Image: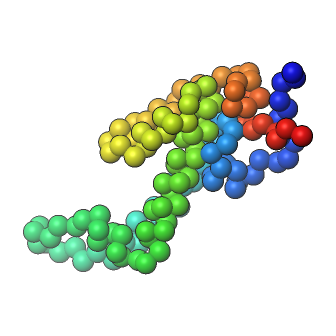
């Protein structure tokens, strides 16, 4: 039986951000995370600018206040979690690890270390069960 072939089509931004199938190397992984965090910084910045900050230190600001500040933010939070999960799965597969370890992105405090750690560890240069090379995915058998 022959080795499966790489997918011949382009791997665009939709694959990078939303598909958990395939492998992604460190550079596109970190660039995608940086883009996501920069995109998410826009509503955070607008929310912080809209806060009524006075000299009174008794006001407590919660995450619920942030989420309720705009009706689209819960959907944006869901989409950003999906993107981080898809990127983590592909990055784990590039390291020849199972994508199930990506559930660690939902563990508070550990998630930031896990996501950044994935970006620092090198992947496998050759083929593995998840793709023929970094930044690739297998073609469907015909």
Q: How far across and down, in percent of the image, does residue 67 sit?
A: 36, 69
Question: Is 17 situated above or below 92?
Answer: below
> Is any atom of residue 129 visible in this view?
yes
**By what rule are the colours in the image chosen?**
rainbow
Q: How many numbered dots are placed on residues in this image?
A: 0
Q: How far across and down, in percent of the image, does residue 120 sit?
A: 52, 30
Quadrant of the image containing the C terminus: top right
Q: How far across and down, in percent of the image, does residue 98 sit?
A: 56, 31
As drawn, is 8 to the left or to the right of 46?
right
As drawn, is 91 to the left or to the right of 66?
right
As drawn, is 138 to the left or to the right of 30?
right
The structure residue drawn at horizontal position 85% and vertical position 38%, both measured from the top left corner, is 141
The structure residue drawn at horizontal position 77% and vertical position 47%, both measured from the top left corner, is 11
Residue 89: quadrant of the picture = top right
Question: Is 60 situated above or below 11?
Answer: below
Q: Nearer the viewer, residue 2 or 82?
A: 2
Q: How far across and down, in percent of the image, does residue 107 sit?
A: 35, 43
Question: Is 76 situated above or below 141?
Answer: below
As drawn, is 83 to the left or to the right of 115?
right
The structure residue drawn at horizontal position 63% and vertical position 52%, both measured from the top left corner, is 17
> Is any atom of residue 30 visible in this view?
no
Q: Nearer the viewer, residue 1 or 99?
A: 1
The structure residue drawn at horizontal position 61% and vertical position 25%, both measured from the top left corner, is 96
Quadrant of the image containing the N terminus: top right
Residue 59: quadrant of the picture = bottom left
């Amino acid at each position: 039986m022959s080795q499966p072939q790489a997918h011949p089509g382009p791997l665009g931004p939709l694959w990078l951000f939303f598909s958990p199938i395939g492998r992604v190397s460190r550079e596109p992984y970190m660039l995608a995370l940086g883009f996501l965090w920069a995109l998410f910084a826009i509503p955070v910045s607008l929310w912080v600018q809209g806060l009524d900050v006075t000299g009174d230190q008794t006001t407590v600001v919660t995450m619920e206040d942030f989420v309720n500040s705009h009706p689209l933010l819960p959907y944006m939070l869901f989409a950003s979690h999906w993107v981080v999960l898809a990127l983590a799965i592909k990055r784990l597969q590039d390291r020849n690890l199972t994508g199930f370890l990506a559930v660690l992105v939902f563990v508070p405090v550990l998630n930031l270390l896990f996501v950044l750690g994935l970006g620092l560890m090198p992947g496998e240069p050759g083929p593995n069960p998840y793709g023929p090379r970094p930044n690739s995915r297998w073609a469907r058998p015909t």
